[in-house]
Image (cartoon, rainbow, N blue to C red):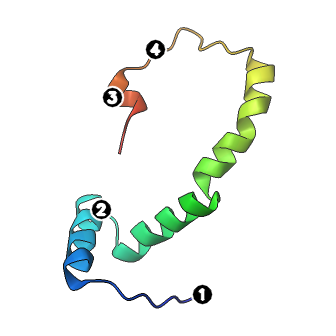
Amino acid sequence: MNLTLSIDPRVLEKARATAGTLGLSLNELVRRYLEQVAGTGDQADSLKELPDLCTTRGGHSAGRTWTREDLHCG
């Protein structure tokens, strides 16, 4: 589906630059944001799996550890 938006030109240029920095097109950046806001996409799918993982895995990380940077990407 196509969508038409009215956006300040300065905001648009900054958004394009941000998308480019992330290696994404502006279209992909906006699509991902809207999926996140709507609760669809990969993040929502992962959250749906969480209760099952908690019960089947017992909450054990098998010794794996994470740094703050690992947990706070993007």
* Residue 53: % across, % down: 74, 28
Which numbered dot is residue 69?
3
Give the amino acid type for the residue marked by disc 4 in the picture. Thr
Q: Earlier in the sequence, mark 2 or mark 1?
A: 1
List the residue tagged with mark 1.
1
Q: Quadrant of residue 14?
A: bottom left
Whole-angstrom CA distance, mark 3 to mark 2, is 20 Å
Q: CA distance from mark 3 to mark 1?
A: 36 Å
Q: What residue is at 61 percent from the left and 58 percent from the top?
A: 41
Mark 3 and mark 1 residues within 8 Å of each other at the beta carbon: no
What number is the disc on residue 23?
2
First in sequence: mark 3 or mark 1? 1
Judging from the image, what secondary structure is the residue with disc 1 in? loop
- Identify residue for label 4: 65
Query: Could you give the CA–CA distance between mark 3 and mark 4, rounded to whole angstroms?
Result: 12 Å
Q: Amino acid at mark 3?
A: Glu
Q: CA distance from mark 1 to mark 4?
A: 42 Å
Q: Which quarter of the image is occupied by the C terminus?
A: top left
